[in-house]
Amino acid sequence: MLAHDLKPYSRHEASGMKALADRHVGHYTTIDHESDIMLGAIKIDLNRNLGTFVGDVEHEVAHCFETQFPPCEDWTPIDLHEKLLRVVAQASARIFVGYPMCRDERWLECSTKFATDVMTGGEKLKQWHPWLRPVAQYFIPEMTRIRGDHRRALELLLPELRKRKAKLDDPDTSPHNDMIRWMQDRAKNTEDKSFNEKELANLQMLTATAAIHTTRLAIIHALYDLAARPEYIEPLRNEILDVMKDGDGVLQKQHLTQMKMLDSFMKESQRHSPPSVATYQRKAMVPIKLSNGFNIPAGTIVQCNTNILDQTPAEWGDPHAFDGFRFYQLRSKPEDANKFQFASPTYDSMQFGFGRDACPGRFFASNQIKIILAYILSHYDIKFDEGVVGRPKNFMFEVNVLADPTKMVLFKKIQ
Ligand code: HEM
């Protein structure tokens, strides 16, 4: 219950960003960077525009499957880690940098590698004594690459920005509606003098880092859960086909809202395989007093356990069972119809964090995951490779819960 005690503190008093930056030596890996422009663009502009983009994202997902996946006429092993990185990166880039840049291989590579360089570079640098880090950073290849990633992102963005500038005077072209534009507009409206093209490139890299790997991992976990429990495939597929009956085969925002069984399955998958076993991480920037009398000195990092299966409310049923429709059933009472959703962070469901600074990209993530899973389920049958028995055990890396990358899921096109 002590998690509630932190809620009244502002983001500058109990800072999620500083906790994250400490974990990944953010001063060196460049992620210790808080931006109101980026947060506003995600929290307000992205969320406000979610409905507008469903068709565009679905189009990008379809393009990816058509161009990046083998034909799958017969059962074909798919390296989900590699393929879904591409699908999620391109589908997200459609909204972050717009079309056609979302298909630029160089941009996709740059925006996905940056996150890996930050994680690995940070881990390596942490092995060094803090006094030695200013020098040690130059001996770590990933740290050198991080600097290169920023330069490259700017180089790749510049032609797009120039193109947009040139079009500004053309009355026949409508302005772009994507995160580049939202960030630029926010900087203009707030007269933020520190914002320039370089800062825009940096914020794009940070947004991609927060968005892509987390979303990909949630989809892989869900597909592993599906392949291990094939009895869920048919009801989920039926729900998808049923909600899409109206709409001429084009996916719309309300279809995603209506996919309640899929939403429940995603939430149950995430309950068993959260992105991390530690959540709601906050660095106390001021002394914090908890309701049990405990004092947290400034500078301390606190966190909650995401993996609280034993402490789930009794009405949720057997906490250890995998019940893909657990939350679907809980939502069947009219008064609970809007509760227990994948993107609802609550005290019992902290996979997206907690409190006012819970993940601002969770509604977008929920949509992306549904669009991609709906595409897979309506175009393919899936199963595990022979020899895989049950649900493959997850791997732990520090607090992160990773899906076993050695296991292959087989895909076969539905004729
Ligand atoms: C399944 C996918 C995702 C998961 C599991 C996830 C999880 C999280 C978690 C646990 C936090 C920390 C919240 C807290 O401590 O209270 C967070 C923060 C954040 N997430 Fe996500 N996230 C996902 C997708 C996204 C996407 C798609 C975006 C961007 C569009 C995004 C942007 C952010 C940002 C900017 C923050 C920092 C917020 C702040 O400083 O106030 N995330 N996310």
Image (spheres, rainbow, N blue to C red):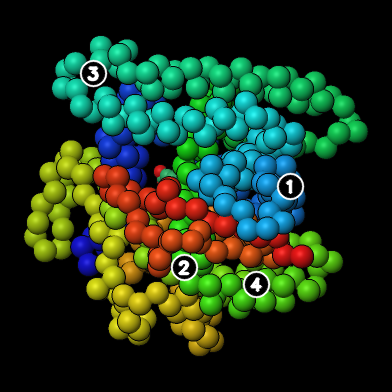
Q: Report, in whole angstroms, how far the alpha carbon at label 3 lies from the one at label 4.
A: 52 Å
Residue in the image at 49% along x and 84% along y: 329
Residue 52, given in percent of the width and then of the height, sits at: 72, 53
Residue in the image at 25% along x and 59% along y: 305
Along the polypeptide, which appears first: circle 2 or circle 3?
A: 3
Q: Name the residue under label 2.
A: 228
Q: Mark 3 points at which residue?
A: 133
Q: Nearer the viewer, residue 274 or 305?
A: 274
Along the polypeptide, which appears first: circle 4 or circle 2?
A: 2
Q: Report, in whole angstroms, how far the alpha carbon at label 1 lies from the one at label 4.
A: 20 Å
Q: Nearer the viewer, residue 20 or 140?
A: 140
Q: Which amino acid does label 1 sit on?
A: Glu
Q: Name the residue under label 1.
A: 66
Task: Locate residue 156 relative to residue 331 in the image: left or right.
Answer: right
Along the polypeptide, which appears first: circle 1 or circle 4?
A: 1
Q: In which quarter of the image is residue 183?
A: top right
Along the polypeptide, which appears first: circle 3 or circle 4?
A: 3
Along the polypeptide, which appears first: circle 1 or circle 2?
A: 1
Q: Name the residue under label 4.
A: 237
